[in-house]
Image (cartoon, grey):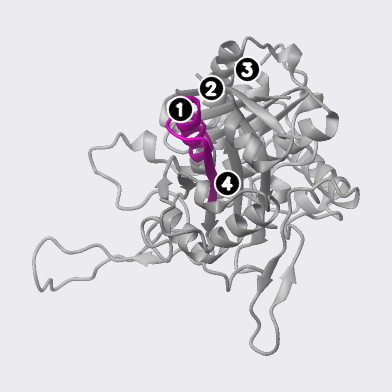
Amino acid sequence: MRDVYIVDAVRTPIGRYNGALASVRPDDLAAHAVRALLDRTPELDPARIEDVYLGNANGAGEENRNVGRMAALLAGLPTSVPGVTVNRLCASGLEAVIQAARAVAAGDASVVLAGGVESMTRAPYVLPKNDRPFPAGHTELYSTTLGWRMVNPRMDPQWTIPLGESAELIADKHGIGREQQDEFALASHRKAAEAQAAGLFDAELVPVPVPQRKGDPVPYTTDECVRPDASLAAMAKLKPSFRAASEGSWGSPRPEAGGGTVTAANASPLNDGAAALLLVDEEGLAATGREPLARISATGVHAVDPQYFGLAPVEATNRALARAGRTFADLDVLELNEAFAAQVLGCVAEWPEFDPAVLNPQGGAIALGHPLGASGARLAGTVAHQLARRGGGTGVATLCIGVGQGLALVLER
């Protein structure tokens, strides 16, 4: 098997729902990330790119089913460059990176692009067809922004509970109280704000020109959801989003039965964004004329009961580290997607040898945002940039996935 290198990784700033990127189509957003990535490696002939892998969790709207191919065309790549879209829900972007890396490792390609995109703002509504023509009754319209829709009635009902209720189950299982979750969320915002101020995201961010009703497009340059002014006092005012509040003490070590702890403050928001990475083998690396950020070392995937989807990264990461011949003691950084604070804290509780000091050092999705199909690619890219900035080390990018899956990638430099 060939070594696989990440030469470069870029991402757009992440926009909040109906925020700065609301007017930008997802295919244009992905194309912008692809074009910006290639512009940073001018020595590479785009005709050498053998495939484009993009993750996307929706695909029901302007992505036009195969946003990988659409983005390649819109980015101005030669029409001879193929494109494919992959979907592993919240980990679609990381799945795209892994599938692209496998193609290179197997010798099927030398130069590939990988990444992901999601516009949760522009996710369409869908109207299912009726079983019979000319129905007399009403028909339900489904939002495709997030979560279950048109659920098969044969599914076990406990598998199809809302994602936030799943986070509540993890909080129940591990005795994670509301205050602990809010403290984690506050730390995410503070770390992200400090990273912004220190310019730690500059190497990966590419501004997006946002069309205006009048005048020239305005460049959108920074992640929109980071709150430097976040406080525990403000978070405490929010009501639980999925369960009624407990009648017990707010910060009790173990929430009372039925008591809600998950709020909008300690969960990731809805977002828009895109990311792209350039992956190569030794021959492809020579064609870029660049030093790689990192090398892809190993991957891991695992599945659990769907109602505990947030804990699936535990075994996925364990498997990836074992395949890489590494342990938690070897890690310089672990980027675990922050779908919910309870979910991250639950994973950490099941990693007794893990040092939380290396967890999400630049903040996570609670602060930065979680554009579903892009998040996994963002995590892989930010780990690669952190290892390059450190001058070496080992890192992991991992995510939980709705319906009970986890995916992990080990990078080394």
Q: Position of residue 85 (x, y in %)?
A: 41, 48
Q: Earlier in the sequence, mark 3 or mark 2?
A: 2
Kindly state the secondary structure of the residue where label 1 is placed: loop
Magenta-span inclusion, residue 100: yes
Depth order, front residue of 189/342: 189
To which residue does mark 3 refer?
A: 350
User: Residue drawn at (25%, 62%), measured in percent from left and top?
Assistant: 128
> Separation of disc 4 and disc 3 at Cα?
27 Å
Q: Earlier in the sequence, mark 1 or mark 2?
A: 2
User: Residue drawn at (18%, 71%), measured in percent from left and top?
Assistant: 137
Q: Which label number is shown at residue 107? A: 1
Q: Nearer the viewer, mark 4 or mark 3?
A: 3
Q: Earlier in the sequence, mark 4 or mark 3?
A: 4
Pointers 3 and 2 in contact (C-beta within 8 Å): no
Kindly state the secondary structure of the residue where label 2 is placed: loop
Q: Nearer the viewer, mark 3 or mark 2?
A: 2
Q: Earlier in the sequence, mark 4 or mark 2?
A: 2
- Amino acid carrying label 3: it is Glu
Q: Earlier in the sequence, mark 3 or mark 1?
A: 1
CA neighbours of label 4 inside 10 A, class few (<14), some (14 to 19), many (20+):
few
Q: On the picture, is 195 further left or further right than 381?
A: right
Q: Which label number is shown at residue 364? A: none
Q: Which label number is shown at residue 2? A: 2
To which residue does mark 4 refer?
A: 244
> Separation of disc 4 and disc 2 at Cα?
53 Å
Q: Nearer the viewer, mark 1 or mark 4?
A: 1
Pointers 3 and 1 in contact (C-beta within 8 Å): no
